[in-house]
Amino acid sequence: MGLNPHKITDKYINYFENNRNIALINWKYCTENPKNHRGFSDTFWGLTASDGPWGYQATEPKESLDKGTLAPTGALASFPYTPKQSMEALKNMYRNYGKLLWGIYGFRDAANLQENWYSKIFMGLNQAPVVVMIENYRTGLIWNLFMQNKEIIKTLKKLKETK
């Protein structure tokens, strides 16, 4: 969330592009919805670790690890990488599922429409990336501040020297 991936490229990849590709895989998987889960679509996506009907679980865009639970964090913390897809997800989650998914602290942790289940909790661990990454998308503020930290500058310099 703090380390600016635009500024990190190694001999294998640019980290911003890598993160964008990972977010697009998540979006595409939910769009294609290979397990035919109720609600999965190009505007309702976000497979990541979250609360779920069977407790806290890590899910990902892989059929064996897809339990049908979507977390707003997955889509909304991807704003810098998938701004169009993330904005469409935000609008859909708020407008069409807001009565069950939105509350005093923002979006609830997760939903599984297949099970007619909505999380009762607002997990700070999953709320923080949404706020931080939307601000990074808007202004780059968190990335810019973090990257000014002398320890980060020193560490990145050391990493370049060890290539």
Image: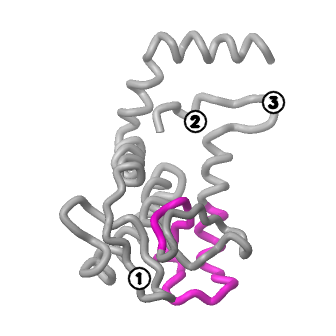
Q: Nearer the viewer, residue 52 or 26?
A: 52
Task: Using the numbered discs, state the Cα–Cα distance from disc 1 to disc 3 in whole angstroms.
Answer: 44 Å
Picture residue at 52% right of the left edge, 89% below the top = 38
Does the magenta portion include 146? no
Question: For the view shown, which residue lies furthest in the left direction?
Answer: 104
Of the numbered discs in the image, which one, if any, rests on residue 11?
3
Q: Which residues are magenta?
A: 24-52
As drawn, 66 above or below 38: above
The residue type indicated by label 2 comes to Pro
Does the magenta portion include 47? yes
Query: Nearer the observer, disc 2 or disc 1?
Result: 1
Q: Position of residue 130 (x, y in %)?
A: 38, 52
Q: Which residue is mark 1?
A: 117
Q: Residues within 10 Å of mark 1 (few under 14, many from 20)?
A: some
Question: Which of the marked residues, 3 or 2, is nearer the chain's N terminus?
Answer: 2
In-image side of 19 versus 95 (left or right): right
As drawn, 103 above or below 144: below
What kind of element bears circle 1?
strand
Work out which quarter of the rendered image holds the C terminus and state it: top right
Q: Residues within 10 Å of mark 3 (few under 14, many from 20)?
A: few
Picture residue at 48% right of the left edge, 71% below the top = 52
- Find residue 28 and report its image quarter: bottom right
Q: Which residue is mark 2?
A: 5
Picture residue at 69% right of the left edge, 37% below the top = 14
In-image side of 24 versus 90 (left or right): right
